[in-house]
Amino acid sequence: MKSFVFRFFSRATIALREMPRMPYGVFNKKFPLPIARAMNKLVFVFLIFCPNRFMIVIPSRFRYIFLMASHSLGLRDYKVEALLQLDFPKASVDLVESFSNARDYYLHGKMPDFDQRLKSVRNESYRVQNQTLREIIQWSFWTLNHKDFDEVNAKVKSFLVSLPKTGEELRRRYLPQHITNLGHLAMLFLYINYYRKSDPSRIIVLPRIRSANDFFLDLILRHSPLKIEFADPEIFSKIPPTQIDTLNYSFGPGGKYRTEADCAFATNQEFPEFRVEDDFILKLNEDENADGLRIIESKLGRKVDSFFVLHVREPKNGDLKFSQARDANISKYFTLADAIEKSGSLVIRMGDKNFPKLDSNFPAFDYAHSNIKSEFMDVWLWANCKKWIGTVNGAAFPPIAFRKERVLLEQWYWSAALPAGDVGVKKKIIQNYPIKIEISHEDIRVSRCMDRAFIARSGYKLCEASSDELASEVSKII
């Protein structure tokens, strides 16, 4: 009993501390579905019936979450406007500004004046310049459509070209972002795959922090033809921005910046790094392959000859309303998994414990919730699967390093830039008015928007694929 009470108050304390920066969708997904829905109704009723002039009674710590609730629950714009007029605590200010800028873009096509912002930091410290570049690119990457993002990325690259050079640009390149999640680690592999040919003497410097998967990082270090060093993470903000490469751009030996593979959707540039060749491909050694096979066969109590990985990003309570646009319900993949199983292969569901558990009759091994899940086994599964099947998320990219083909279903955001052999099936989007029309081009403002509420407020609706549609796509491949 004491343990339960302690855990309850510990979680409550953490939630209260995080409240000024917690999006409503994250807050909503922390609860089981019945509780979340009841909470939504209570918040909705409060916001509807509370007069705008009384919104000021909302404690400042909770104002950001109420602002995001009014947006996510589909309240009228004047309610959102009323909340935007309130004073917010310092911890929320940057998030409120980001939301307000995104709202101006999606509803009115207005972008922040990035030219002026870049101009204003030209003579500032490296720390201020690096922070500004990071904020501009991060907001643009998760907000703007393909065309507009490419334009902003080009502005940033032009700004970097115009800065004074230190003379050290081609000796060491500092990569502060490339190990913080699984997708970023895969981008590190692709970065090396490109520069091992175009600049083989390049030295890469990574922050000395725990990576998203230390075994995967170690495997990259074992195989990398480029020299890799580690440095205290504190120094990266003090490095001249001309010596830093990000997930969005990098400095080439010809003195020009190129767009990185993480932004391949937004440019006509070629990306030869997607071609994984025999002289640089990640492989486990014989003992590691044997260990992984022993672990999986011991757990399943059967011989494992071939298997497909299934990885579908989904909120724990299964409610897509407050989830990102790229999410889907794994329950729809039952028919697909059943077809693979009947073809003679095993289906192994990957992910983490924040995903909902599979139903007991779902034709797949729920590795995500098993006691054999580990960083090593994650890598073993990527390295040995027949194909990787799933929705777009960071874990969709490591299989590229093992030259494994992927089937990206319900792909959002849309991207045609895929390695040879991959299949990408776009998530459909419909324009709701004046008549329902399926949109097939990528220039609409919400073409890469992850916020379902912004998509709806912009007059569009995402169409989730049916179970039969998903199974049909995979049946063409297996």
Image (spheres, rainbow, N blue to C red):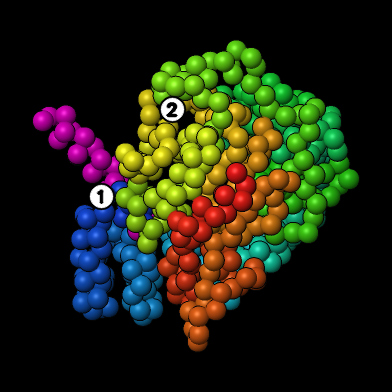
- What SS does tag 2 mark? loop
Density class for disc 1 (Cα within 10 Å; few <14, some 14-19, many ≥20) is few
Farthest top residue?
287
Is 226 placed above or below 128 here?
above
Label 1 SS: loop
Q: Which residue is mark 1?
A: 32
Any part of residue 90 in sight: no
The one of 408 and 245 positioned closer to us in this rendering: 408
The disc placed on residue 373 is: 2
Q: Position of residue 419 (x, y in %)?
A: 71, 46
In the visual, does 437 lie left or right of 274?
Answer: left
Vertical order, 12 against 278 (above or below): below
* Residue interval drawn in magenta: 1-24
Residue shown at 78% from the left, 59% from the top: 268
Q: Where the N terminus falls, by quadrant?
A: top left
| Residue plotted at (54% across, 55% down) | 472
Q: Which mark is residue 467?
A: none
Q: How far is disc 1 from disc 2 in space, using C-alphas?
A: 24 Å
User: In x, y percent, where is residue 229?
Assistant: 69, 25
Magenta region includes residue 209 = no
Q: Residue at x 25, y 40 (%)?
A: 11
* Residue 18 forms part of the magenta stretch: yes
* Amino acid at dot 1: Pro
Dot 2 amino acid type: Lys
Q: Main secondary structure of the magenta part?
A: helix
Mark 1 or mark 2, earlier in chain: 1
> Is 464 or 467 nearer to us in this picture?
467
For the image, the number of numbered tags is 2
Q: Quadrant of residue 253?
A: top right
Q: Are marks 1 and 2 in contact (CB under 8 Å)?
A: no
